[in-house]
Image: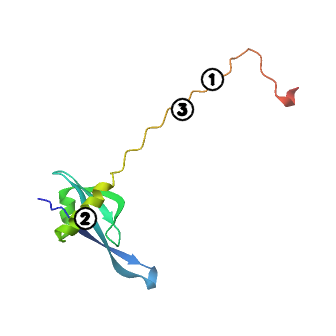
Amino acid sequence: MIEEGIYLEERQGTLGVAGTSKPIVYRNLWATKEVQEEKVILQLLDDKANPTGLTEEVTPRQLAERFVHKPIKPEVWAALKAKLESLALPKPKPKMAPKPQLKKKPNTGTPSKSWWQT
């Protein structure tokens, strides 16, 4: 069963180039926004544990492989969950209206003269 709460993601990276490069670890905190059997929606948190609006949908298997659950106090989780619920999931983009069809000029049978042909 998937626990609601905060998850830590650690990714290896390199900072710098060539001889000045060094390995670093990127650490991101994610909060569960929605938990279902086949998918989990996570929302990225900033450095002050506020939702950023960026979401990612993962499977429970990916969650177990990439993320580590970090326990927090129930009252802290309740406050964070209220913030998460106040932010709506991104809505799908509205469909664009079809482009209007341009009317072609009727062919009069005689070629039109341009200004340089007069």
Q: Residue flagged by tag 3: what amino acid is it?
A: Lys
User: Can you give x and y, in whole percent of width and height, for residue 108 in the image?
Assistant: 73, 15
User: Can you give x and y, in whole percent of width and height, for residue 50 in the image?
Assistant: 33, 66
Q: Which residue in the rendered view is the most extreme toward the bottom?
A: 19
Q: Earlier in the sequence, mark 1 or mark 2?
A: 2
Mark 3 vs 2: CB contact within 8 A: no
- For the point 44% across and 38% down, the residue is 95
Q: Quadrant of residue 47?
A: bottom left
- Quarter holding the C terminus is top right
User: Can you give x and y, in whole percent of width and height, for residue 30 in the image?
Assistant: 28, 65
Label 2 element class: helix
- Quarter holding the N terminus is bottom left
Q: In the drawing, what numbered circle is on residue 79?
A: 2
Spatial CA distance of label 3 from label 2 is 47 Å
- For the point 29% across and 69% down, the residue is 29
**Nearer to the camera, 90 or 62:** 90
Mark 2, Cα crowd under 10 Å, few <14 / some 14-19 / many 20+, is few
Mark 1, Cα crowd under 10 Å, few <14 / some 14-19 / many 20+, is few
| Residue tagged 1 | 103
| Residue tagged 3 | 99
